[in-house]
């Protein structure tokens, strides 16, 4: 019997990366082996993102490239999934008639039967319904051979309805997995050699609110910390309005919790934060950052910032720049505001011209590069614990890993160090990585 091969094109966030891992695990059970080469594939899946217009454009650009393969291989099956599929539904076929099936964010678990139906009947299938439970979230994805870290979904969906964001419409309402399912999955991962887990959710700080139990995110972290074999815990993403004092204190009390938090601020202007429906003020955010640094002085804080939101004046923009100066984030993911269909911000007046958005973004990114490099330079000469992830992409003589603060370190070492916690002296700092040597 001829081997069947699967190629997955993934766009967007860590949630999508993990969704793709689950897709690959499901299809492997149906006889599809993963391949890195689309030309070799019998089944190609697109796992898309719709958070910004650029991500949507990139997905359809890549799809156009793949569709050329189908002209040469008519039996090739193409599935279009993820947030963009959830958003467009059958309209995907209007833009790409060669697509065989479309599946939304709640329907990953149906992949094997959708593919089987296409194989047998060669007819289009569209599955974009939301479900009252999370059948897809409980799919176990065995990690890649030799992997030392893994993502674990603890919840899906969002109830916040930030004015610029399509996630509540595309991922559905907030739903939490049971702690028993989460703990069981992590224990299984340790059997594969996983030493670090990242707990995933659109707003992990709200974990547990949809469960008939007293558990919250803090108590879940403590349960994960008791699992033998797990040496590090991370999580993403945190909404500032739901960042509790109890969770902040975990950075002092839970030894396995890494000293890093991704805390999207989006803007430093109270006017813009209100228009965004973020539910906190700049002062609230600054207070929580101060509390985090009191509890854990070495904590690394990263963030997201949007420039050019409707009605953002030069004064509002400057307030964001001023906040960056006060906080000095370790790094920032920054974007120009991108209008999305269905969001409240789309109806706002006072749109900012593209040229001005680009000017603001370029200046902000240049400033953040200065802060990031300065933060990294401060680590030169220091000792850092690094979890070795494998060989460096830049040199076959080097190994690479991350500090507890989520900074990449490359160093001269042997492959048998993979999966080990090592102490490195930081010898050189760069903008996006560090250089170290074994102590």
Image (tube, rainbow, N blue to C red):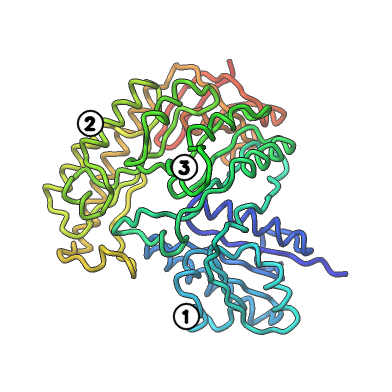
Task: State the image quarter where residue 31 is shown.
Answer: bottom right
Residue 391 place in picture, x, y as percent: 64, 36
- Image vertical order of residue 59 relative to residue 209, above or below: below
The disc, 1 or 2, on the residue closer to the chain's N-terminal end is: 1
**Sequence-first tag of 3 and 1:** 1
| Residue visible at 58% across and 57% down in the picture | 134
SS state under label 1: helix
Where on the picture, by quarter, is residue 330? top left
> How many angstroms separate mark 3 from mark 1 (CA)?
32 Å
Q: Nearer the viewer, mark 2 or mark 3?
A: 3
Query: Quick one: label 3, few (<14), some, or many (20+) residues within 10 Å?
Result: some
Which quadrant is home to the N terminus? Answer: bottom right
| Label 2 residue SS | helix
- Cα distance between the residues tagged 2 and 3: 23 Å
- What distance separates the C-alpha of mark 1 from that of mark 2? 46 Å
In front: label 1 or label 2: 1
Mark 1 = which residue? 91
The residue lying at 23 percent from left, 57 percent from top is 309
Residue 79: % across, % down? 61, 72
- Residue at the disc numbered 2: 326
In the picture of the structure, the residue carrying the numbered disc 3 is: 236
The percent coordinates of residue 361 (x first, y second) are: 26, 51
Q: Residue at the spot x=64%, y=44% of the render?
A: 181
4 lies above or below 20: below
Q: Is residue 307 left or right of residue 386?
A: left
Q: Is residue 235 above or below residue 14?
A: above
Judged from the image, the secondary structure of the residue bearing numbered disc 3 is: strand
Q: Position of residue 395 (x, y in %)?
A: 60, 37
């Amino acid at each position: 019997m001829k081997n069947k091969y699967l190629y997955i094109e993934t766009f967007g966030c860590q949630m999508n990366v993990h969704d793709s891992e689950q897709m690959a695990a499901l299809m492997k059970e149906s006889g599809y082996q993963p391949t890195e080469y689309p030309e070799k594939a019998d089944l190609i899946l697109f796992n898309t993102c719709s958070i910004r217009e650029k991500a949507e454009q990139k997905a359809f650009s890549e799809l156009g490239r793949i569709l050329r393969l189908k002209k040469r291989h008519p039996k090739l099956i193409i599935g279009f999934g993820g947030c963009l599929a959830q958003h467009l539904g059958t309209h995907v076929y209007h833009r790409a008639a060669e697509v065989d099936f479309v599946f939304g964010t709640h329907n990953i678990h149906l992949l094997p039967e959708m593919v089987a139906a296409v194989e047998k009947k060669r007819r289009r299938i569209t599955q974009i319904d939301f479900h009252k439970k999370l059948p897809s979230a409980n799919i176990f994805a065995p990690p890649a051979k030799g992997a030392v870290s893994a993502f674990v979904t603890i919840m899906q969906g969002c109830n916040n309805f930030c004015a610029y964001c399509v996630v509540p419409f595309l991922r559905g309402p907030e739903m939490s997995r049971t702690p028993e399912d989460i703990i069981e999955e992590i224990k299984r991962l340790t059997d594969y050699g996983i030493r670090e887990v990242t707990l995933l959710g659109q707003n992990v700080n709200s974990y547990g609110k949809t469960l008939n139990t007293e558990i919250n995110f803090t108590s879940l972290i403590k349960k994960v910390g008791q699992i033998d074999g797990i040496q590090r815990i991370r999580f993403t993403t945190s909404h500032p309005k739901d960042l509790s004092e109890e969770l902040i204190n975990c950075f002092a009390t839970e030894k396995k919790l890494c000293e890093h938090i991704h805390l999207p601020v989006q803007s430093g202007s109270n006017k813009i934060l209100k228009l965004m429906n973020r539910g906190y003020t700049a002062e609230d955010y600054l207070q929580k950052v101060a509390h985090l640094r009191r509890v854990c002085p070495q904590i690394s804080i990263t963030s997201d910032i949007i420039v050019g939101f409707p009605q953002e004046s030069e004064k509002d923009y400057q307030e964001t720049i001023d906040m960056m100066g006060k906080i000095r984030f370790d790094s920032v993911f920054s974007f120009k505001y991108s209008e999305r269909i269905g969001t409240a911000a789309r109806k706002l007046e006072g749109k900012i011209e593209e040229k001005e958005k680009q000017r603001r973004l370029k200046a902000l990114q240049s400033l953040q590069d200065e802060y990031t490099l300065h933060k990294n330079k401060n680590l030169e000469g220091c000792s850092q614990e690094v979890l070795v992830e494998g060989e460096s992409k830049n040199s076959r003589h080097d190994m690479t890993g991350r500090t507890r603060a989520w900074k990449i370190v490359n160093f001269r070492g042997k492959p048998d160090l993979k999966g080990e916690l090592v102490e490195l002296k930081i010898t050189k700092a760069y903008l996006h990585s560090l250089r170290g040597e074994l102590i």
